Amino acid sequence: MSTAAVLRRPKTGTSSDIAIDCNVNKIFYGNFLAVRDSAVPIEKGKITGFIGPSGCGKSTVLRSLNRMNDLIPGFRLEGKVDFLGQDIYAKGIDPVVVRRYIGMVFQQPNPFSMSIFDNVAFGLRLNRFKGDVEEKVEHALRRAALWDEVKDKLKASGLSLSGGQQQRLCIARAVATEPTVLLMDEPCSALDPIATRRIEELMLELKKDYTIALVTHNMQQARRVADVTAFFSVDISKGGRTGFLVEIGDTNNIFDAPETELTKQYIRGEFS
Ligand SMILES: Nc1ncnc2c1ncn2[C@@H]1O[C@H](COP(=O)(O)OP(=O)(O)OP(=O)(O)O)[C@@H](O)[C@H]1O
């Protein structure tokens, strides 16, 4: 069976509510133990927010969900990450195919130095899409709430757009190939408050069609958009700096009735 055949999209009515079942025992960069003991189920159709102090491993865990960390020399994961019940780190699974189903939007908007149209069409062409590219590009730009602003200048460079528009272009690029899950690594950190609000509104709109995992430094953002929040912290007890999951639960519970003292302290702003 081919890899593409192995990685299926979720069907309605499947028994599990989990899109990605992430069970990290350990993640290393070389000899450095960056993250330990983090079981983070990413529920279908929800936004799961990752919060926690700098260096607690939020991005590392997020990037493990679509094998983006494979690109980093020395990266090693002990544990299991299942996408719709299939181990994405299993032998024979092509990370490129994994990333087609589990797309990513980065902190810095990173449109390619090409036209708006070509930015969105990029993944389609890469995947040798045989259908109507123009229709797909328009659909993706509409999904990213950018169509009205760019429909008359599709040949202009993606780099000519504002920061917020560029980030929406990157979201359009990510959704053009119709992934199942979108990983968003601090997608608003380079944006002003108005552009941030637009992206937050967009995330709430996108979750109707996509499962989203979101790393954010901004606790208020997690509170505004995340259905589920995972709080990570850093363990310095053994002389290292190892991130770990403290707790995960409904966002309201994490913010209003957290189970651990550590979460309470973080939510109260006692450390950052
Ligand atoms: N490419 C890398 N090579 C080596 N160590 C890394 C690499 N990327 C991250 N780390 C280390 O792994 C740990 C977790 O980093 P990570 O970026 O995942 O944390 P984070 O919670 O996302 O941090 P921040 O909020 O500051 O972005 C940190 O100690 C970091 O220095």
Image (spheres, rainbow, N blue to C red):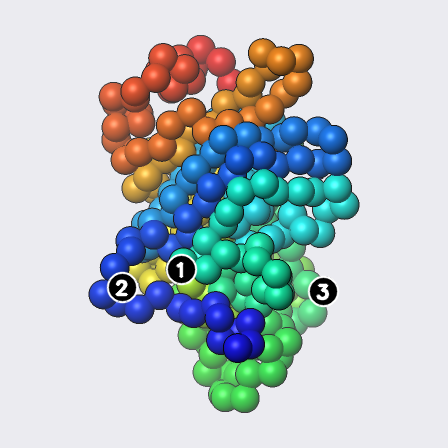
Asked whether the viewer can see residue 14, the reply is yes
**Mark 2 packing: few (<14 Cα in 10 Å), some, or many (20+)?**
few
Are discs 1 and 2 less than 8 Å apart at CB?
A: yes
Query: Which residue is the site of mark 2?
Result: 14
Question: Residue 241's spot in the image, x, y percent?
Answer: 63, 20
The residue shown at (56%, 26%) is: 243
Mark 3 residue type: Ser
Mark 1 or 3 closer to N-term? 1
Mark 2 residue type: Thr
Q: Is residue 133 above or below residue 225?
A: below
**Mark 1 packing: few (<14 Cα in 10 Å), some, or many (20+)?**
many
Which disc, if any, is residue 84? 1
Question: Residue 242's spot in the image, x, y percent?
Answer: 60, 24
Mark 1 residue type: Leu
Question: Residue 93's spot in the image, x, y percent?
Answer: 59, 64
Total count of labels:
3
Query: Which residue is the site of mark 3?
Result: 113
Q: Secondary structure at mark 2?
A: loop
Asked whether the viewer can see residue 99, the reply is no
Q: Secondary structure at mark 1?
A: loop
